Image (cartoon, rainbow, N blue to C red):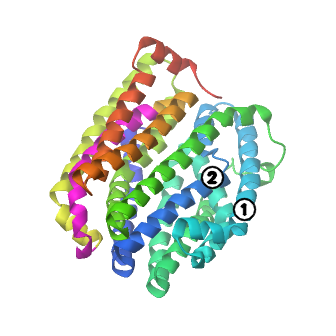
């Protein structure tokens, strides 16, 4: 399937996601305010870590290997059985740990043991959340964009209804509970989508783990675990720094700015996951890989720059539409944040080469470097120029990251040759 066609199909899901996110942002902005937004961001960082460990961090590897084994159905089945068994064991373990330490987690991440109830709901939902993520990874690897898109649309609509309703009746606590269970409930829609597919054989999925496939997934486990730890950890540290220097409300402004970036970049990032990652996993010739990279760069970077420019020019309208007038101070973040977003997407095109070709150590090193640069740059820039310094740190971080990932993937002929040779499968 071509990048343009994938973008068009995925665009339907993104339009729905953006529309629901706009509605949900408006509801939350009115009901919980900037300070509540900061706590929601804190919880979502924690949830990302929990889900990654609950899935065994295998989903990226499943997508890549499913695409790679397109002509070997027996090996695909061994891969899926190994992945499903791993996910079942990991998600059950994580659910038990989350429930057992719910009070401690609530106190540490949400600042109040009364939110322990939220962690109990996470524990209840973690198994269906994990298997829904696994099924979506398989659909992605099979390039079954239609079913993938339908499940994502259902998730967006459910998130709007459930989070909006619970936040309306129970405030911040209701919003956090809804965020805990939304992804788990979506598995019903995903199962309805795949139940008649000839590859869907749940009875054959739980059983002996294939050591060869497990070793093949190990590199992706390390990469996903690194992302799941470094990304949220750096955001938690930055948020704590903003709270210390400017207060909880300003941390909420930053979370709102981050949410805007997430919403509009989702059109780009989900298309890259649907099309670009499986595609580069298939290629074995440098000329084809270079052509694919150049073609995607020529489409994606101008599109991101255009969207960023539109958002900057309409920032007053965006803040009023998505949030409320009380979020006005976040306007000072737009220029640096949106410029950083363009560089971020450009860098990700090279970072996807690391994922698709299995450059595990290079990926881990650059992820850790990016997290450290973001935190350190935030410390320096917020001291020099105040609150807008957090967005300037975002820009600098991805500028450094882009240089690093480009040099480690295609910077020299030796790197390019290694890129083609390497694959953890």
Residue 3, quarter of picture: top left
> Which residue, given by chain and number where applicable, does mark 2 sit on?
135
| Left or right: 148 as drawn, with respect to 336 | right
**Which residue is at 25% across, 55% downward?**
388
Query: How far apart are the alpha carbons under marks 1 and 2?
Result: 24 Å
What residue is disc 1 on? 97
Residue at the (19%, 50%) spot, across then down: 309
Q: Using the image, determine if residue 153 lies above or below residue 170.
A: above
Tell me where the magenta segment starts and ends, as one range. Answer: 324-351
Q: How many marks?
A: 2
Q: Position of residue 325 (x, y in %)?
A: 22, 75
Residue 173 in magenta? no
First reached walking from the N terminus: tag 1 or tag 2: 1
* Residue 316, disc: none
Residue 201: % across, % down? 74, 51
- Identify whether 134 is placed above or below 412: below
């Amino acid at each position: 399937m071509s990048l343009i066609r994938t973008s068009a199909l995925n665009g339907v899901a993104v339009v729905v996601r953006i529309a629901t996110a706009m509605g949900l942002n408006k509801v939350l902005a009115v009901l919980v305010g900037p300070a509540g937004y900061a706590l929601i961001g804190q919880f979502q960082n924690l949830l990302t870590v929990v889900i990654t460990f609950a899935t065994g961090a295998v989903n990226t590897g499943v997508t890549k290997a499913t695409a790679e084994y397109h002509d070997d159905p027996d090996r695909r089945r061994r891969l899926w059985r190994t992945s499903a068994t791993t996910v079942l064991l990991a998600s059950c373990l994580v659910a038990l740990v989350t429930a057992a330490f719910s009070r401690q987690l609530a106190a540490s991440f949400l600042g109040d043991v009364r939110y322990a109830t939220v962690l109990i709901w996470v524990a209840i939902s973690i198994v269906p959340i994990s298997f829904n993520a696994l099924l979506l990874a398989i659909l992605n690897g099979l390039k079954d964009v239609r079913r993938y898109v339908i499940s994502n649309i259902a998730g967006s609509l459910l998130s709007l209804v459930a989070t909006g309703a619970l936040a309306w009746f129970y405030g911040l606590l209701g919003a956090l509970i809804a965020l805990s269970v939304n992804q788990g409930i979506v598995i019903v829609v995903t199962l309805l989508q795949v139940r008649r597919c000839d590859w869907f054989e749940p009875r054959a999925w739980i059983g002996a783990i294939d050591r060869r496939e497990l070793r093949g997934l190990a590199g992706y486990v390390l990469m996903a675990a690194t992302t799941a730890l470094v990304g949220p950890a750096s955001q938690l540290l930055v948020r704590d720094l903003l709270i210390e220097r400017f207060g909880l409300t300003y941390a909420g402004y930053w979370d709102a700015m981050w949410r805007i970036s997430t919403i509009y970049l989702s059109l780009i990032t989900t298309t890259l996951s649907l099309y670009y990652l499986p595609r580069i996993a298939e290629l074995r010739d440098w000329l084809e890989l270079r052509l694919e990279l150049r073609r995607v760069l020529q489409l994606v970077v101008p599109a991101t720059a255009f969207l960023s420019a539109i958002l900057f020019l309409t920032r007053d309208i965006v803040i009023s539409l998505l949030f409320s007038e009380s979020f006005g101070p976040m306007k000072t973040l737009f220029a640096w944040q949106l410029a950083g977003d363009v560089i971020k997407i450009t860098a990700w095109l090279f970072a996807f080469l690391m994922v698709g070709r299995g450059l595990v150590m290079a990926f881990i090193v650059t992820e850790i470097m990016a997290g450290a640069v973001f935190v350190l740059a935030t410390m320096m820039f917020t001291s020099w120029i105040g609150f807008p310094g957090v967005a300037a740190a975002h820009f600098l971080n991805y500028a450094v990251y882009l240089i690093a990932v480009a040099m480690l993937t295609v910077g020299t002929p030796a790197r390019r040759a290694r890129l083609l040779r390497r694959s953890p499968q």
